[in-house]
Image (tube, helix red, strand yellow):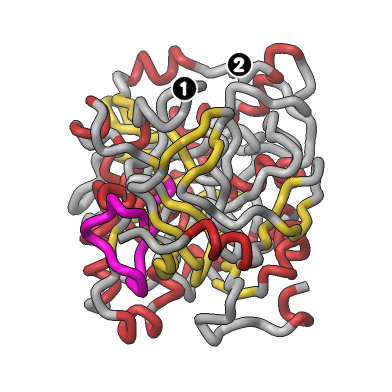
Amino acid sequence: METSNKSKGQQQRNRGVTYQGPNTVQVKDIPYPSFDMTIGGKRRNLIHGVIVKPIVSGICGSDEHMYRGRTPVKTGTVFGHEVVGEIVEKGMDVENFEIGDWVIVPFNIACGRCDNCKQKFTQCCLKVNDLQPGGAYGYVMMGDWPGGQAEFMLVPYADFNLVKIPDKTMAKSKILDIALLPDILPTGFDAAVRAKVSPGKTVYVAGAGPVGLCCAASCFVLGAARVVVADPNPARLERAKLLGCDVMQVDERSNINQELKRVLGAEFTDCAIDCVGYECCGEHGMKRKTSAEKSEALNQVFRAVKYTGAVSLPGVYMANDPLAETAEAKEGFLLVNWPVAWNKGVSIEQGQCPVLNHCSFLLNLILNDRLSIAKALNTKVIPLDYAQQAYQSFSKGEAVKYLIDPHNMTGLLTTSTEAK
């Protein structure tokens, strides 16, 4: 049965990380979730949903695109799409979960009923976003669903969307790794699968941020013989070394094939993965970019992969970039060296990860001590009120994965000095 959400919501406080303009987020009072909410301008009856109390909510590189003003995000948007939490209320149509369950909240919002969901393309649900297929929490153009960098959040279609964590005691001891499951670890794994990584292959990974490191670790899970990670940031490359990767310090001017020859002994790799996206050049995304600059990580991936090799592109490429330098770049147009990819006969896969396809077995790997990468990501747990400091540091390229713990449920909060 549904709990008395209306009376509870009137009494319950809620705060969240809200966008207040380029390079500014603030923790503000926000509405407590309700099973009857207006989402994307449409009144929705959400009795199929649950209200979740986040245990941890990650700050993602995708959040940084919005934070830096590189998207048409609305002021007041509540950020956060990487949530592991506890169910505190449930709608009357929820059958498979109970109050008190610990759950992973995949960032894809999916109805479970449309044609795409039935085919497991949950990243392109046809029912949760009136602007375009696909929904996500706290993200621009993805349906206006409030995010989870907050004290409480709503998860619709709970029976379909959520992944239950079976053992709370075990989960708490591994919470830093489990915190990667709503997005970046499945995203990295999915990218490796799409790039056809398999035993004995060599892989080039562009980007040593959290997604790139999750992708590199996933490549080893899939049996890769060598994984070469490229990034201009030496601190991030040091994190990649902890995973057993070869590393290359490169920028947009680097000759990727010469660097690969030096590091790997060969000019090309079997597989190549772009874990950077459109903010790839100069000053950690702060530089205003032309179409050519926004395309460079992608072009380097095409140059790195062998003839008949495979490429995947989990890195974000936005259709709107208000702070780009040229009109074409503002509309998302790229200057891609397509003849290189065409001439090589490269197979290409791209887009958002359907997290549900990978989440459960990656959770099993974590719970059974077969996969642990939070330490390599230099994970830090911070209070909700330190979100602005964390966004600033991460935006400057700090080699850290920040997790917000709004209720001190992990017992792992850093001090204020460490978080700044």
Identify the residue at image location x=75%, y=39%: 75
Residue type at mark 1 is Gln
Is residue 84 left or right of 334 when viewed as pictured? left
Q: Quadrant of the N terminus?
A: bottom left
Screen quadrant of the C terminus: bottom right
For disc 2, the neighbor class at 10 Å (few under 14, some 14 to 19, many from 20) is many
Where residue 69 sits, quadrant-wise, is: top right
Q: Tell me which label, 1 or 2, sits earlier in the chain.
A: 1
Q: Which residue is at a point 28% across and 54% down the rendered structure image? A: 94
Residue 179 screen position, x and y as percent = 44, 66
Based on the displayed image, in which of its 4 quarters is residue 86 positioned? bottom left
Query: Where in the figure is residue 285, as x and y percent of width and height?
Result: 71, 41
> Which residue matches tag 2?
333
Residue 172 shows which numbered tag? none
Residue 311 within the segment the image draws in magenta = no
- Kindly identify which residue carries mark 1: 132
Whether residue 34 sits left or right of residue 169 in the image: it is right
Q: Give the x, y percent position of residue 367.
A: 26, 76
Location of residue 96 with respect to 314 vertically, above or below: below
**In this picture, which residue range is highlighted in magenta?**
91-107
